[in-house]
Image (cartoon, grey):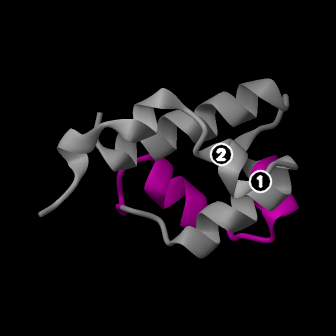
Amino acid sequence: MNLESAVRKRIEELLKEKNLTLTNLCLNSNLTPSTVFDFMYGKSKSPKIITIKKLCFGAGITLEEFFARDYFNDESDVVN
């Protein structure tokens, strides 16, 4: 799984785990909905780490918890 897909998958998991809509997560994270929607629906790639950190804050988790999934360990996505 590539990194963008892994981040999207994790955000989708968080929405289910926290019983949030994408719009509510954006509001909780102090992010504009377009920033997150554009990434989630493929209009932009690779969100900045600060965006992910804000999403974590909005979901009430740490960056460590966000990335604590096996699918983030796929080394085939590493660019040499």
**Quarter of the view holding residue 58:** bottom right
Above or below 21: residue 40? below
Residue 52: image location, x then y, percent: 61, 61
Amino acid type at circle 2 is Phe
Secondary element at tag 2: helix
Residue 61: image location, x then y, percent: 81, 48
- Can residue 45 be seen here? yes
* Camera-nearest residue between 57 and 16: 57
Residue shown at 36% from the left, 58% from the top: 43
Quadrant into which the N terminus falls:
top left
Above or below 1: residue 26? below
Residue 76: image location, x then y, percent: 18, 41
**Is 52 left or right of 62, judged from the image as shown?**
left
Span colored in magenta = 24-45
Residue shown at 73% from the left, 34% from the top: 15
**Is 62 left or right of 34, judged from the image as shown?**
right
> Residue 40 in magenta?
yes
Classed neighbour count for the residue bearing mark 1: other residues with Cα under 10 Å, few (<14), some (14–19), many (≥20): some
Tags 1 and 2 touching, CB below 8 Å: yes
- Can residue 34 be seen here? no
Secondary element at tag 1: loop
> Residue 54 in magenta?
no
Above or below 48: residue 26? above
| Residue located beneath label 2 in the image | 66
Q: Residue furthest left?
A: 80
Q: CA distance from mark 1 to mark 2?
A: 6 Å
Residue shown at 47% from the left, 29% from the top: 70
Looking at the rendered structure, which numbered label has been put on residue 62? 1
